[in-house]
Image (tube, rainbow, N blue to C red):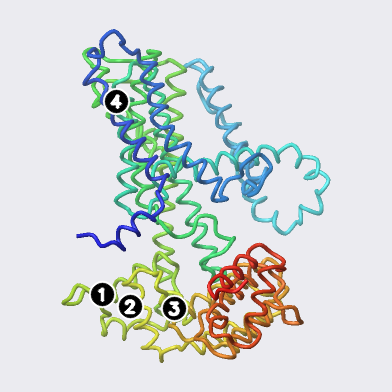
Amino acid sequence: MTSEAETVAAAARPIDWEAAACVTSVALLAAVAAYPLYEGHLGAFDPAPAHWAIAFGAACAPAVITSWIISILAGRLPARPGATPKLNHISGWSFLLLALPITFIVLLALWAATVPTGQRAINATWGIAVTAGLAIIFAFAAWAPSWNLGQRAGWMFALLRPIVAPFGLVMSIIDSLLVFVVATAAGASRGSWQMRYFLLAGFLLPCAILGYSLDPPWGLIPLAAGFVIAISISRRWAWIEDDRELAMLNGRFVGPHLRIGFEQDLRDEAMLSFMSMFFLVPLALRQVEGALGIFEIANGVDTHDMRNWIAFFGSELAKAVPFVDWAEIYDFEGEAGIQIGDNPSARHVVFSTRVLVDLVFLAALLQALGISARNAKQRELFTGGSLNRLDPFIEKAEFRKLVRRGDDGAWVADDSAVAAFPEYDVIRLGELSDASQPKAIQVVAKALRMKQGGSTSAEFHDELLRRAMTTRRDREAIMEVVQAIRGAGPERQVFELDQARRALNGAVRMVEARTSVMRLIVDAPQSADRTLALLEAAQTGPQRDSLGPVRAVAIAGLAAAAIADEPGVRALVRQAAKHADTDAERRAAKAIVDQIGEN
């Protein structure tokens, strides 16, 4: 039977509206994708393909809208244009560097399609120009960094900046929407990999089914949505990998420098999303042919049979991979029942798919291989002693190797594996010992701390005081040690904590860090030193804390001292209940007054 405490805890658990909306969208998409089963059985109302396309959009809406709203409430997206956070991570110059080659490729394709078949040749002059142009580009890339162009051509950059900046802003907005709205709606933010796979498949499979079953060109709408989902998962994965690099560069696994964090590793999801495009593209080609009839179809070839379109797309991929155009060199031609023919539109469509393969598919594959190489190098440096910590993804995988299930099913450390494990950052081990971490990680962290000499809570208190007294304080560094102290156990050294609180008094943009230090003092066992530290932080005087939230925590921590009627405590509480500077302080004081029964 369920205990009363469990029932209360379940009732108090907040509803995950984002997950509920995503599951709702998946259920609606499954119902829409199954429309061929009940098409013609809906009575007087017989929806047209356009209606089913609209229904597809409506089915996606709950997940997309909810993810958008929650991203705004969580501060990941601005509530209105110009509000924080600023979406400007893609500069206008980055847009220009991307737009120029794309524009050149598009213009080249449009020009090539207009040249008569008999006149399509690359003459010698062109060959000289291309060779010289590429040489100039490489020379510029080699020498430009030493030319100080920002100073020499500052007038030109100042002239172009207002022109290109809006394009960078638009690209930043689109990129952020893909990462925080589309990818999140498709399950990228779910903590469980099973849930992520379920939601991703729940979106991509209906896109493919509707892309096959809807009459042309309406099937292109869900197929386009499938492309957008795949790209959005890839972009979120790229953001996560950027965060991994930043975290290892500055040694901070939390903070404003991280945009996504390390809750999920989306490498597998991104690769599977791109894999789905090998089937979505042939479906799109089939839809284009059904709408425009631009390809050359051999006699007896059924254009409704997807095998023919997969064969056609595969033959084009064979000619496109991997960049070297081997098929042209060795005079190989595709022999699928579907051919490009002489229609310029067909050539444009196939050219777009080959560009997609070269610039997207292979780029993603190379990125995955590069990340694998980087992970291997990180492990090598850690094993060799050059690094004393791993990034969160590798850390979790390596720590899992150090534990096993005991006879009672609980996690226990593998003593031999722990003994062979290299020295690890003691502050990080203190963080990982915290009760908020998974149990297996806690067990490993505590075992490693004992193996390395049992880094004590006293060491962490000293480190906190050192970091609090530095000239340039780092909020994330302080929070890191606070977590280490919590993970190290219940011991609290009030003197060091109070000195750290005083050192931080007046430091700007440190509300969370200063409040956390005060909570450590409150967590200390009741003593005269603890009471004095809380009184000095809350009452008027030279050591009074400058932040209302910190003073409110200090006042709330005086409850036990007020009940015990320690000197000066009840007077302070009564005074704060009536005349404190902030509502939080007054509420904390009034709660104590009610508890001790005084007005």
Q: Is residue 383 above or below residue 273?
A: below
Q: Tell me which residue sits at (56%, 22%) in the image.
A: 111
- Considering every residue shown, the one lying at the far top of the view is 44
Query: Which label lies toward us, 1 or 4?
Result: 1
Asked whether the residues under the numbered discs 1 and 2 touch, taking CB atoms below 8 Å apart as contact, a structural biologist would say yes
Q: Tell me which residue sits at (34%, 42%) in the image.
A: 200
- Type of residue at label 2? Val
Asked whether the residues under the numbered discs 3 and 1 touch, taking CB atoms below 8 Å apart as contact, a structural biologist would say no
- Type of residue at label 1? Trp
- Residue at the spot of label 2: 443
Counting other residues with Cα less than 10 Å from the Cα at mark 4, is it few (<14), some (14-19), or many (20 or more)?
Answer: many
Point out the tag, 1 or 4, that comes first from the N-terminus.
4
Asked whether the residues under the numbered discs 2 and 3 touch, taking CB atoms below 8 Å apart as contact, a structural biologist would say no
- Residue at the spot of label 3: 487
Q: CA distance from mark 3 to mark 1?
A: 17 Å
Which percent across, then down, holds residue 161?
A: 75, 42
Q: Is residue 477 visible?
A: no
Which percent across, then down, holds residue 228?
A: 45, 35
Point out the tag, 3 or 1, that comes first from the N-terminus.
1
Q: State the mark number for residue 309.
A: 4
Q: Secondary structure at mark 4?
A: helix
- Residue at the spot of label 1: 411
Query: Which label lies toward us, 2 or 3?
Result: 3
